[in-house]
Amino acid sequence: MATIMIRRIRKGHSPFKPDREHLHHICQRLGMTNHMALFIICLMASIMAGVGIWADMVQIPESVMFISFLCIFAVYFFVISHIWRITTLAHRIFKVRSPAISEPLSSDVRTNL
């Protein structure tokens, strides 16, 4: 919520104005189904909760946990603020296309088939 409000204020919009920049909207625009987006969001929340419970059980100082939270929030804010650049770069790096499949057949090749 804080990330969305900060982004809206930086754009000059009201922090209470609705938009489609929530995490589940971003996941859907990246090609995930509603169920996949929900699963990913719940998985990340569960991991963060598990780490918090574990840190409390092993008695990590609260100051360390708070600084860790601020660091994780900063990384999350950076990623969400630059999500479209990051996904474009990721698509370029990980998307392997076979030229034979991605390019249409030329007329010479089609006539020989």
Image: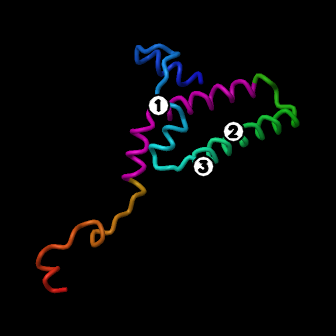
Q: Dot 2: within a 10 Å radius of its alpha carbon, few (fewer than 14), some, or many (20 or more) residues?
A: few
Residue at numbered disc 3: 35
The reply, left or right, for residue 46 in relation to residue 37 is right
Q: Earlier in the sequence, mark 1 or mark 2?
A: 1
Instruction: Report the magenta residues as a range.
Output: 64-92
Query: Which numbered dot is residue 45?
Result: 2
**What's the residue type where badge 2 is placed?**
Ala
Residue 71 in magenta stretch: yes
Q: Quadrant of the N terminus?
A: top right
Determine the residue positioned at 42% across, 49% down.
90
The secondary structure type at the circle numbered 2 is: helix
Query: Which numbered dot is residue 20?
Result: 1
Q: Position of residue 48 (x, y in %)?
A: 71, 38
Q: Dot 1: within a 10 Å radius of its alpha carbon, few (fewer than 14), some, or many (20 or more) residues?
A: few
Q: Position of residue 64 (x, y in %)?
A: 75, 27
Q: Dot 3: within a 10 Å radius of its alpha carbon, few (fewer than 14), some, or many (20 or more) residues?
A: few
Q: Earlier in the sequence, mark 1 or mark 3?
A: 1
The secondary structure type at the circle numbered 1 is: loop
**What's the residue type where badge 3 is placed?**
His
Determine the residue positioned at 41% across, 14% down.
12
Q: CA distance from mark 1 to mark 3?
A: 18 Å
The secondary structure type at the circle numbered 3 is: helix
Tell me the colour scheme of the image: rainbow
Q: How many marks?
A: 3
Q: Quadrant of the C terminus?
A: bottom left
